[in-house]
Image (cartoon, rainbow, N blue to C red):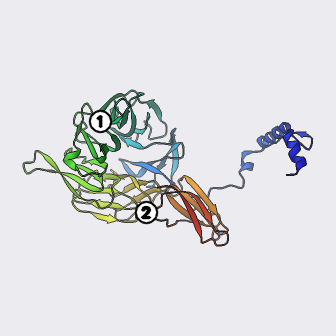
Amino acid sequence: MSRFEACHLRRGRIFGIPFGFLLSAVCFSLLLLPSPALCASWEPIGPDGGSFIFSVTNPADANEVTAITTSPSPSYVWRSTDAGTTWRKIGEIPNFYIPDVTAFDFSTLYAISSSRCYRSTDGGATWTESRLPTNAGWAYYVCVDPTDSNKVYAAGYLYVSSEQRERMAFFKSTDGGQSWSTSSWFSFDYFSPTDMAISKSNPNVIYVTGYKAVGSYSYGALLKSSDGGNSWTDISDSVDSERYNIFYAVAVDPTDADKVYVGGSYFYRTVRTPRGTDVSWTRSPAPLFIYTIGIDPVEPSRIYTGGYESIGISTDYGQSWTLRPNCIKSAAMHVQAALANPSTVYISTYAGLYKSPDSGATWASAHWGLRAAMISALAVSPSKLLIQSNDYLMAHNRARNRDADSDWGYVVTPESCGVVCDILINPDNPDTVLILEGYG
């Protein structure tokens, strides 16, 4: 810019024309243009996928599946009628942060987010919002009574400033999430919930897992209610009292409230005593660090555990395992076997939705055509396009097919690398790439 132009800009004019008038004229001209003209040179080329947190299949048709992605805002609800081959968006939850979703059936869904609860009675197409009581804590996990869709429970934590300690916060609704009662339990130096489960055969039995700090040490936390949340017992020490363990996931056998599974660094399961009246816990090495547990609804001896890039499968109630490594991308968030066809299993991950048609023996991505990926970094060279999408670094070969949305591949990143927040490609040597780690 010349000094002459700069001088006129400072005075609010460009070549004798008032700057405000010029700006208004330009903006008005742009408004007159049809919207396609503004974006005529843009078209989506992928990648497909997104941060999947939940899926549920139609109990009458295993090919009909609903999936929910979260971040960026809002959270989207997708529907497939061909077992994940094609998708269409059917609704959205007006919140980008949805840590947990539960389903009473294929129509009635609940989503929880800190101080809000969302309910859908039309399969996720529309949602109603309610607020949890103020100053009662924050909720991060939700479950619904399998016999009564109006009974909803949520778990989180409450910081008690007068004690400078944290408690487990429990929320209960008997009118479909419209109003809530609250209570808080126990007192820890620190508490963080990680999962929640309810017994299908005895809905009064509810479990919450997490980890707690007592003094300078942290432990796995397993909290149990046998009366629908009216009272709670800390049974952590009966499972494991080893320091620094985390109880990350919990699941209850749908046919037996006394068969309970807890996962994390180890896999824990209950066993009956010889008399058959009491239960105790056994600990075994986990096939992987367990983030989620799913149980076959027809053959409950078959259990699925999801970890980072791998799936563990047991056919004998968790006594032995088969590991399927490198079959998914990113960390598993939710696993579900279809009731209408239990050999069809879906895994929700931060990097997409994956499906197995053969009870976990083989896995393939089931999110093509579903564009909900979050891109946090991008770099371009004449031959390639690199992006950080969700949890993974991906590359697009521009030289081979400039517009193909399917020509994406995952790029190997260092194992210790956290979230990539910036990417640089050497202009003199496109094979040399620098990545900046944000945190990890």
Q: Residue 36, percent across and down? A: 72, 48
Q: Residue 274, percent across and down? A: 8, 51
Q: Does residue 285 show up?
A: yes
Amino acid type indicated by mark 1: Ser
Amino acid type indicated by mark 2: Ala
Mark 2 burial class by Cα count in 10 Å: few <14, some 14-19, many 20+: few
Residue 73 relative to residue 358: left or right: right
- What kind of element bears circle 2? strand
x 25%, y 50%: residue = 261
Q: Residue furthest left?
A: 275
- Name the residue nearer the viewer: 210 or 416: 416
Q: Measured along the vertical axis of the image, is residue 128 above or below residue 358?
A: above
- Which mark is drawn over residue 89? none
- Name the residue nearer the viewer: 317 or 268: 268
Q: CA distance from mark 2 to mark 1?
A: 44 Å
- What kind of element bears circle 1? strand
Pointer 2: what residue? 364
Q: Residue 422, percent across and down? A: 58, 58
In the rendered image, which quarter is residue 386 located in?
bottom right
Q: Measured along the vertical axis of the image, is residue 275 above or below residue 396?
A: above
Q: Residue 68, percent across and down? A: 46, 47
- Which mark is drawn over residue 187? 1
Mark 1 burial class by Cα count in 10 Å: few <14, some 14-19, many 20+: some
x 83%, y 37%: residue = 20
N-term-proximal mark, 2 vs 1: 1
